[in-house]
Image (cartoon, rainbow, N blue to C red):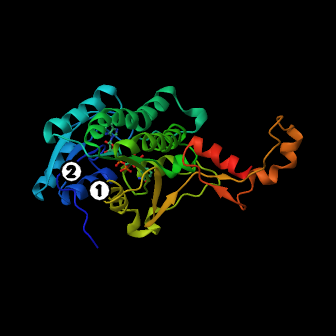
């Protein structure tokens, strides 16, 4: 097995002051990468801030002989995202890897979600991932090399109650990743998504917020599933995706209780209407089984254009 090294590579890991991001930052640094450890240092809802969370992780990396710089700009603003990339360039001269990991959580039912909570969650997860992508892009494109990891979530891709803004942001991140991957291929910028699972500060908050409020909805109890809910279980997959050895792009990968798996969006073969005139509503009802059945054939379009080609290939 060839060992995977990050010697000569520079990585930005956002939200790396604790939880899953900290595990990513420590592992890349352990493998020789220089890491900009970003963390706002606020609470789980994204309020407040301090330099200490990022600084403690940098201290840990330096004590182990690694190279890292602390940054506590916010990914939730344009200025913050630009400052994070500028900091990495100033400190290390290049950026090879961006791991969009920072996140906040504000749980409530859709009917009870305030504009402020919705906006803050979207700004941190989705808009922050976009703005950091935009800020690193010219540097990665110029050097013809880049690896961008987007942190999605099963709560967005598959859905969960009480996480409206969070789920929308995480599903949006999967869409953003698909677009970035298609645009990045010509520049050597490979983009993939991670759907992690871990007992972290955020997960504990979610469990507390959901407790007793999700009638008939079962939640997994962290104590019954052992070590595989430790943040570190997510890191090997993320670090592989961030490495030179990984040539995959446009993939979404789930780490769940130690099981690593490709998650994809596909379309079933469906029912083909006559192409000369729109079908009637009654015809939709009549063909509902073919339209909705996931047990027959399906395809995984690699772009919107590819979906047209797939449908035409069926004639
Ligand atoms: P965490 O709360 O320990 O880590 C998130 C970090 O992001 C915190 O250290 C926080 O200070 C930082 N952060 C928040 N707002 C920021 C901002 N504006 N700028 C910079 N940093 C900011 O939680 P965890 O679980 O480690 O989450 C990491 C990522 O994984 C998040 O994107 C989360 O949504 C995602 N995720 C976690 C899952 C889990 O089971 N723990 C499941 C699915 C996704």
Near-viewer residue (192 or 247):
247
Residue 237 to residue 86: above or below: below
Question: Seen in the image, is 19 located left or right of residue 157?
Answer: left
Residue 297's x, y, as percent?
70, 60
* Circle 2 SS class: loop
Question: Seen in the image, is 91 located left or right of residue 183?
Answer: left
Residue 59 to residue 229: above or below: above
- Confirm or deny contact between disc 2 and disc 1 (CB under 8 A): yes
Residue 131's x, y, as percent?
36, 32
Near-viewer residue (141 or 294):
141
Label placed on residue 9: 2
Q: Which residue occupies 59% across, 58% down?
A: 218
Q: Quadrant of the N terminus?
A: bottom left
Residue found farthest to the bottom: 1
The quadrant where residue 185 appears:
top left
Residue denoted by label 1:
244
């Amino acid at each position: 097995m060839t060992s995977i090294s990050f010697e000569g590579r520079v990585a930005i890991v956002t939200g790396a002051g604790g939880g899953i991001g900290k595990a990513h930052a420590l592992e890349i640094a352990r493998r020789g990468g220089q890491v900009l450890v970003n963390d706002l240092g606020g609470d789980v809802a994204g309020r407040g801030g301090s330099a200490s969370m990022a600084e403690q992780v940098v201290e840990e990396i330096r004590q182990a002989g690694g190279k890292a710089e602390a940054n506590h700009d916010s990914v939730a603003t344009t200025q913050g995202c630009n400052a994070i990339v500028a900091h990495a360039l100033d400190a290390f001269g290049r950026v090879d890897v961006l791991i969009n990991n920072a996140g906040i959580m504000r749980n409530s039912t859709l009917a009870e979600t305030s504009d402020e909570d919705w906006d803050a969650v979207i700004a941190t997860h989705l808009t922050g991932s976009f703005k950091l992508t935009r800020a690193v892009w010219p540097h990665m494109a110029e050097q013809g090399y880049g690896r961008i990891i987007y942190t999605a979530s099963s709560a967005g891709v598959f859905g969960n109650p009480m996480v409206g803004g969070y789920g929308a942001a995480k599903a949006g991140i999967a869409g953003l990743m698909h677009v970035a991957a298609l645009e990045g291929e010509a520049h050597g910028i490979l983009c993939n998504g991670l759907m992690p699972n871990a007992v972290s500060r955020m997960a504990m908050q979610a469990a507390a917020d959901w407790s007793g409020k999700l009638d008939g909805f079962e939640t997994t109890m962290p104590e019954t599933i052992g070590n595989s809910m430790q943040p570190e279980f997510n890191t090997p997959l993320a670090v592989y995706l961030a490495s030179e050895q990984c040539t995959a792009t446009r993939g979404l990968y789930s780490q769940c209780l130690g099981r690593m798996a490709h998650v994809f969006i596909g379309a079933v073969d469906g029912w083909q209407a006559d192409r000369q005139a729109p079908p009637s509503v009654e015809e939709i009802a009549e063909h509902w089984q073919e339209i909705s059945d996931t047990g027959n054939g399906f395809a995984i379009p690699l772009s919107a254009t590819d979906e047209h080609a797939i449908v035409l290939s069926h004639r």
